[in-house]
């Protein structure tokens, strides 16, 4: 996801100020994306490094569920903060 975002941002906002410059940015982005996908495929069932069922897959699923819960809570908090900011600007 990060590598994909890196490539999209480079394409949509090429003039955006960046505190850290990467030489050969497109090459690095594509290499990171391809290697990330390859690493993910290694852990799918039937591959050489496949995760063991159910122990290791249960850990992966638990982390994914926890990530979903935290994402939902963060989104809810950001929406509440945005509403509070818009109300405070209206009161001025």
Image (tube, helix red, strand yellow):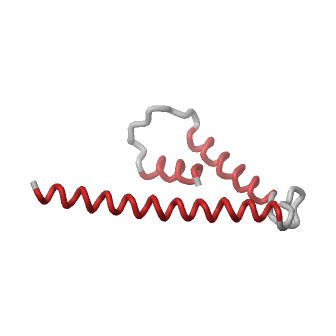
Q: Does residue 85 appear left or right of residue 68 in this picture?
A: left
On the image, which quarter does residue 25 sit in?
top right
Name which residue lies at 65% across and 51% down. Answer: 33
From the viewer's perspective, is residue 12 above or below residue 60? Answer: above
Q: State which quarter of the image contains the C terminus.
A: bottom left
Task: Locate residue 32, reporting x and y percent.
Answer: 66, 46
Q: Does residue 59 appear left or right of residue 89 in this picture?
A: right
On the image, which quarter does residue 44 sit in?
bottom right
Task: In the displayed orientation, state which residue is furthest to the left.
Answer: 92
Q: State which quarter of the image contains the N terminus.
A: bottom right
Task: Locate residue 54, reporting x and y percent.
Answer: 83, 67
Task: Locate residue 4, reporting x and y percent.
Answer: 57, 54
Name which residue lies at 16% across and 55% down. Answer: 89
Q: How many marks?
A: 0
Q: Nearer the viewer, residue 7 or 70?
A: 70
Task: Locate residue 9, reporting x and y percent.
Answer: 47, 50
Name which residue lies at 76% across and 65% down. Answer: 58
Q: Nearer the viewer, residue 53 or 6?
A: 53
Q: Does residue 54 appear left or right of residue 13 in this picture?
A: right
Q: Does residue 32 appear left or right of residue 16 in this picture?
A: right
Name which residue lies at 18% across and 56% down. Answer: 88
């Amino acid at each position: 996801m990060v590598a994909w975002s890196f490539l999209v941002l480079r394409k949509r906002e090429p003039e955006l100020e960046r505190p850290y410059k990467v030489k050969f940015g497109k090459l690095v982005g594509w290499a990171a994306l391809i290697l990330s996908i390859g690493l993910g495929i290694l852990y799918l069932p039937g591959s050489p490094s496949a995760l063991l069922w159910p122990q290791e897959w249960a850990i992966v699923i638990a982390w994914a569920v926890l990530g979903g819960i935290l994402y939902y809570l963060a989104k809810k908090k950001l929406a509440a903060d945005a509403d509070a900011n818009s109300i405070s600007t209206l009161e001025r």
